[in-house]
Image (tube, rainbow, N blue to C red):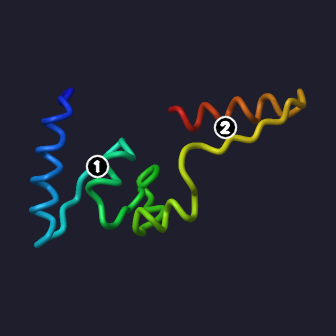
Amino acid sequence: MILMSEDKRLIWRILNEISRNQTIIITIQSMEEVAVLCHQIGIISHCIPRCYATPLHLKELYGSGFKFFYSNQPEHYRELKEYIKSILL
């Protein structure tokens, strides 16, 4: 489902109001939404909890965006290809 910006903000406002009195568990792909909605973040990868912290703490630990290191050595090509496939799939 694609939401317009006004619809997203309305949903965010409602969720923020509800979350003052109780815990809400949601799944989010957008870090923009995480920053607006979440006081605590739990990250699960391949059915395993990986971390639980505040958005600020995670930004301090991992920064924003992706960090990508590349070696142009031919012997590393296969390993790099497999790593990229594992991230994208």
Considering depth in this image, is 74 or 2 the residue closer to the camera?
2
Q: Amino acid at mark 2?
A: Tyr
In the image, residue 19 lies at what x, y percent?
A: 15, 65
Above or below for 43 versus 20: above
The one of 27 and 59 positioned closer to us in this rendering: 59
Left/right of residue 77 with respect to residue 50 in the rendered view = right
- Residue at x 38% of width, y 62% of height: 42
Label 2, residues with CA under 10 Å away: few <14, some 14-19, many ≥20: few
Is 17 left, or right, of 38 in this rendering?
left
Residue 11 appears at what percent x and percent y?
A: 13, 45
Quadrant assignment, res 16: bottom left
Q: Is residue 48 above or below residue 12?
A: below
Q: Which structural element holds mark 1?
A: loop
Residue at x 18% of width, y 39% of height: 8
Callout 2: SS? helix
Residue drawn at (11%, 44%), measured in percent from left and top? 10
**Side of 81 relative to 24 (left or right):** right
Look at mark 1 in the image and give the residue it sits on: 27
Q: Which residue is mark 2?
A: 83
Which residue is most to the front? 6
Q: Quarter of the image for the N terminus: give it.
A: top left
How many residues crowd around disc 1 within 10 Å: few (fewer than 14), some, or many (20 or more)?
Answer: few
Q: Quadrant of residue 70?
A: top right
How far, Cα to Cα, is label 1 from label 2? 25 Å
Q: Is residue 21 left or right of residue 38?
A: left
Measuring from the top left, give residue 2's x and y in whole percent. Answer: 21, 27
- Front residue of 36 and 48: 36
Q: Earlier in the sequence, mark 1 or mark 2?
A: 1
> What kind of residue is marked 1?
Thr
Q: Nearest the camera: 66 or 72?
A: 66
